[in-house]
Amino acid sequence: MNARPLYYDKDTVCEVTSLSAFTVEDLVRRNEFPRPRQLSGKRVGWLAREVEEWAESRPIADQPPPPNTGVKRARGAASPAPRA
């Protein structure tokens, strides 16, 4: 039996929302994203249902995403050279 997770850790929140950790933290600070719940002394998690409800509440975009959306660069990878 594969139970659906009740809580997401930050890495999972980033993965399921396609947002960076910085963006998630910034949205939480601005009260524009669900706040994490205290799970134990030093562990927090986001209630999966709240993250999904937030995602479903996002407005429909008027334009498609740019082609590089979701493409991750290796850490420390140099930026492409500027075109002349």
Image: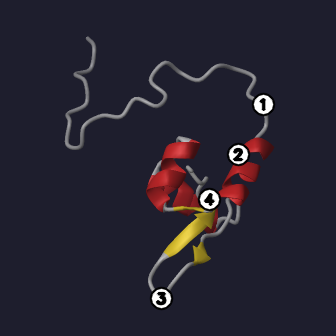
Dot 2 amino acid type: Ala
Residue on which disc 1 sits: 60
Dot 1 amino acid type: Ile
The mark lying in front, picked from 2 and 3, is: 3
Question: Relative to residue 63, is residue 76 depicted above or below?
Answer: below
Q: Which mark is residue 41?
A: 3
The mark lying in front, picked from 4 and 3, is: 3
> Nearer the N terminus, badge 4 or badge 2?
4
- Seen at 59% across and 23% down, the residue is 65
Residue on which disc 2 sits: 55
Residue on which disc 4 sits: 27
Q: Do the residues labelled 1 and 3 touch (CB within 8 Å)?
A: no
SS label for mark 1: loop
- Seen at 30% across and 34% down, the residue is 73
The mark lying in front, picked from 1 and 3, is: 3
Q: Are marks 1 and 2 in contact (CB under 8 Å)?
A: no
SS label for mark 3: loop
